[in-house]
Amino acid sequence: PRPAWVVTSQAALDTELGVLKSGKEADAFLLERAVPGSDAPGESVVMVAKRYRGEEHRTFHRSTSYTEGRRTRNTRDMRAMTNKTAYGRSVAAGQWARAEWEALVRCHQLGLPVPYPVQIDGTEILMEWIEVAGETAPRLAQTRPDAGLLAHYFEQLRDALLTLTEHGLVHGDLSPYNVLAADERLVVIDLPQMVDLVANPAGADFLLRDCTNVCRWFAARGLDVDEHALFGELMSIAF
């Protein structure tokens, strides 16, 4: 069942509120979907619209290592992407949007802390806006949690990694910059590069890097954690 805050009225209009963040391969905007003239509950919501750029405007240099093990069924699309035609670039941008959409849907189904995926339209994804008191939740890297909250944050990320690994998935770019801190709750974002731990030849390397990025941030703030211990724990349930 979709959350109650999702506006489904056909009379609703979308209004762009401004840029939220410009990234390496996509830009995020705040967007309000509301029924004009209505103050009724459930008929107005602010969401995030993430729009992927074409290949010629992206700086996502490691994209080929993330797509190892993925398959493009349409041979025309594959040829166009290989030849880097205008059509091929649009196909590639759409594939990254679709990859993130599918990752969000899968993670949400697994009960992982990710933004709720609302809809996808071409190269644009609409998703839940993670906010605190009307402002976008800060990235974990921007926070200064006390010792108790720091440990609580780590356990949330450890649990998320355990669930991902148990289902053969790797975030692939997990770091304190790709996690939002909504008060005491963490939410993992930026999922287009999610890989299959087995199908991708570098799956284990990506998992170790995720562990390293996470553990070093927590260790620098005084928590006794080790990336190799975490990686070993995850790999023990992976196969």
Image (cartoon, helix red, strand yellow):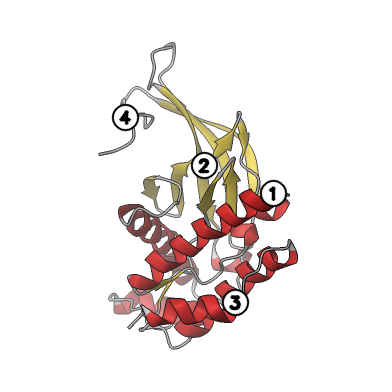
Crowding at mark 1 (Cα within 10 Å: few <14, some 14-19, many 20+): some
Residue 27 appears anywhere in the view? no
Closer mark to the observer between disc 4 and disc 3: 3
Position of residue 200 measured from the top left corner of the image (x, y, whole percent): 41, 83
Mark 1: secondary structure: loop
Instruction: Report the residue marked by disc 3.
Output: 227
Q: Quadrant of the N terminus?
A: top left
Q: Which of marks 4 and 3 is nearer the N terminus?
A: 4
Report the residue marked by disc 2.
Answer: 48
Q: Circle 1 is placed at which residue position? A: 145
Please tell me how crowded label 2 is: few (under 14), some (14-19), or many (20+) other residues with Cα within 10 Å.
Answer: many
Please report contact status of discs 4 and 2: CB closer than 8 Å, yes or no: no
Identify the residue at image location x=53%, y=40%: 130
Which one is in front in this view, the residue at disc 4 or the one at disc 1? 1
Give the residue at mark 4.
8
Q: Kindly report the distance in space between the C-alpha atoms of the residues bearing marks 4 and 1.
A: 38 Å
Amino acid carrying mark 3 in the image:
Glu
The percent coordinates of residue 100 (x first, y second) are 43, 60
* Label 1 to label 2: alpha-carbon separation: 26 Å
